[in-house]
Image (cartoon, rainbow, N blue to C red):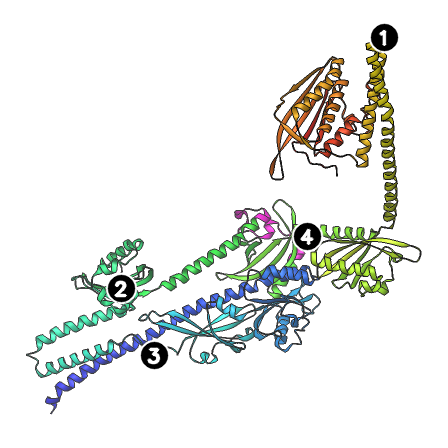
Amino acid sequence: MRSRLSPYIAALCAASLVFAGVWALANSEKERYRQEIRTDVLQELTTIRARLEAALNSRLFITRGMVAYVSTNPDLDQPQFVSLARVMVSQQSGIINIQLARKNVISHLYPVEGNEEAIGINLLENPSSQEGVKRLLRTQKTVVAGPVNLVQGGIALISRTPIFLSEDRTRDGNTYWGLVAILIDPKTLFEDAGLTLVGEGGATLTKEFSILSPKEGETLRLEYALRGKDGLGASGEVFAGDASLFQRNPVMLDVSLPNGYWQLAGLPVGGWPSYAPVWWLYPLGVLLSGSFGLCAFILVREPRRLEKAVEEATGALRESRERYAIAVAGANDGLWDWNLNTGEIYFSPRWLAMVGCEEEAIAPHPDEWFSRIHPDDLERVEAEIHSHLRAESSHLQSEYRMLHSSGSYRWVLVRAMAVRDLDGKPYRLAGSQTDITEKRQAQEALRVSEQKFSKAFRSTPDAIAITRVSDGRYVEVNDRFLEMTGFELEETLGKTTDELNIWVDFDRRDRLLQQLKEHGVVRDVEGQFRTKSGDIRIGLLSAEPIDLDGVPCLVTITRDITERKQYEQKLYHTTCELQTIFQALPDLYFRVDIYGRILDYHAGQELDLYVAPSDFMGRQLPEVLPELVGEKFARAIAEVQETKSLVRIEYSIGFEREEKSFEARLLPLLDSQIIIIVRDISDRKRAESELQQAKEAAEAASQAKSMFLANMSHELRTPLNAIIGYSEFLKEEAEDLNCSEFIPDLSKIERAGKHLLSLIDDILDISKIEAGKMDLYLEKFSISALVESAISTIQPLADKNHNTLTVNNFASSHYMYADAKKVRQILLNLLSNAAKFTENGCITVDIRRKTASGNNSAVPWIDFQVKDTGIGMTSEQMQHIFHAFTQADASTTRKYGGTGLGLAISHQFCKMMGGEILVESEPGVGSTFTVRMPCEAIDLSV
């Protein structure tokens, strides 16, 4: 019986042993796979935590600036707060609003719209904020609360930071100003952290995120949950995700908060996978156990006949076991097995998935592997493989980039080991390949983050210094520190503040160190420091301890506020000066709202007011002023609101003794207010009235004079024309009667009459001009003919004084459209003066046509220039030569005669035709008069 059962027992034992070994190997692979998945989840969770902390801290950072400003400006109003808050939150998304709570009561808010219900809330009495504020007052540190339901609706995370007004923070509340709070949208915060919102309800959010599993190309979806509401950590409520996730063995990490922490948990959706990609081991185990069992059966039953077959099977089994043992030793992810003797290489399905290929699309040849290695890595990888094959290393491990079928490169980690024969010659190289792309990306992100931190440390506008707590010596300083103090880097590192003589007030330094020891942090404390050159400057200092590679250190941030303090001092003096000036002004001052309600006033004397302050404070202007005046102010206030600019009105009010006139200036102010400055202009109005009366009287007298001169000129013309006519007639009779002795006297009578008639014509012209009765008769005429006529008329007078008369640059083809008679009269006046005031000299006439730019077009002009070498004029004389009845001086009048009307009339004629007269002169050298007129004159006489 024993003889018949022995083969079966041997076969059963062999099969059981082999199958048990394969089963143990499979369980080991399953556990390794689970640990690998857990490691991947931990790595992804670490990335999410870093993003979440960065997203939260970037928003909490803006409270520092608000704390610094309020601590030095505790009386800021809502507009100042809005201006400051708008700048601070402009670069951050997800900020619902920012608040200031003076004595824990919300007093400032931005934005106000939609959040009005939050104003005036006492945070210590509000159930949703009571515990968080008490915790803030107890710890005197920033507290992150929530998510909480807001009074104005919605859900938010709330960060509250205390504000103290002095450098010594105490717990008795004497220097406690209040707190600054920012409300953060949880949805935006989680999205910035890389989490995808699946659903939300109340203050609970559910999140899912996908990562690429390194197993068989599967996509593993992760589920997240956060607990530790109000920063209470493991003891706090779950406020994001499924609360049951914490009971399912998740991966958990702490998310640091300024005062407490959250716990972030991650778990694959559906729980940890219960399978592993080792299914092929089970059929392999069955096959091997069957083979070993059959071999044992045959060996026991027919040992002699099957001895050779057993040896062959044993060799095959050894080879198979070696292959999988090596694969396991190589941390098998993507497996490969290279037979160095035959040159063939085996690629596992996972290896093929890593490069994006199908099994039938790739040949079992090493070129399929090496051709996909990045060109920059290929030479190094080949050298490492050859080095290992030469037994220069116990195993092969290398990181390089491998080409994916999509065209992108993936980072892989290869672990391999060579199998050698008894002589140490390698005949097989097998190993595994792990995709580490995301790990390398995380490392690169960490490197970039460190670079950014280093750059921020170096380029920040504040001075940053790191000192050891043990001896106070500088470990690191940034460029701004060196710039502010004037020291070089090698002069600073390894030295203390005492050795550099930086501190000015050592008592202040000791108090700061004591405060740092008691409270663990110093925030925005003013202090003086000394530069290398000995200058004393003022800094705003903050400090807190840090751990630097296990060494306790102190980081100090200092902002140079010397210029700001100087500006504040100057602003204070300027404000005092302006207030003093304002108090000294005699004007009345009122400040009203947009409805005309009087909010404040200033008056030098209350007697200047229309009614007593008790009758107008808090009331609208139309209620305390006369009806018409009140309506004027109402319209002016409406206009100021519309135009946002200065509006002036004038009005009169009857007082008990007299009626007074006032001018009011209305200007817009911040906070929808308007200032009104009222000036008593009664004296000015009386002066203006008297001046207007005097002006009207002068105009009436001038008109009467002009009328008189016009009438007298007309009355004198008739006898003068008779005198001139009879003198000409008598000259002709004398010539006919050959009575030559009478002719000279008759010529004198004729010239005197004509001269007198010319004077009367000038007086009549100037009278018409002054009375506005002078008309223009525009026509087209030849400039050549007009100039020749004027030259021929003036030639005798030039010859009389032995002068040479020359005309230059005259183009006879030019025409003008103007009043020819008045242009001729202007030329005659200029030529007459030149001939009269020049003796034995030269008179030159230049006529030029020029083009000037005007109204986006080219406008042609004619310049008539009369130049003489006569007596000339001084600059004082040239200032009044164009005034009527005025000559250069009395001596000129006595010597050369004249009334002084010629140039005045010529000047007025030029203006009427759109031209002008220019003069240049020098005593003893001569004068140059230039008449510039448009070729087509415009009648400006009306």
Quadrant in the picture for the N terminus? bottom left
Disc number for residue 274: 3
Residue behind mark 2: 416
Going from N to C along the chain, the mark reached first, 4 or 3, is: 3
The amino acid sitting under disc 3 is Ser
Residue furthest out toward the bottom: 1
**Tag 4: Cα neighbours inside 10 Å, few (<14), some, or many (≥20)?**
some
Residue behind mark 4: 565
Residue 496: say if magenta.
yes
Distance from the alpha carbon under mark 4 to that under mark 3: 68 Å
User: Is 621 left or right of 500, judged from the image as shown?
Assistant: right
Residue furthest out toward the left: 305
Residue behind mark 1: 741
The amino acid sitting under disc 1 is Glu
**Tag 1: Cα neighbours inside 10 Å, few (<14), some, or many (≥20)?**
few
Task: Return the x and y of residue 154 as percentages of the image width and height.
Answer: 57, 74
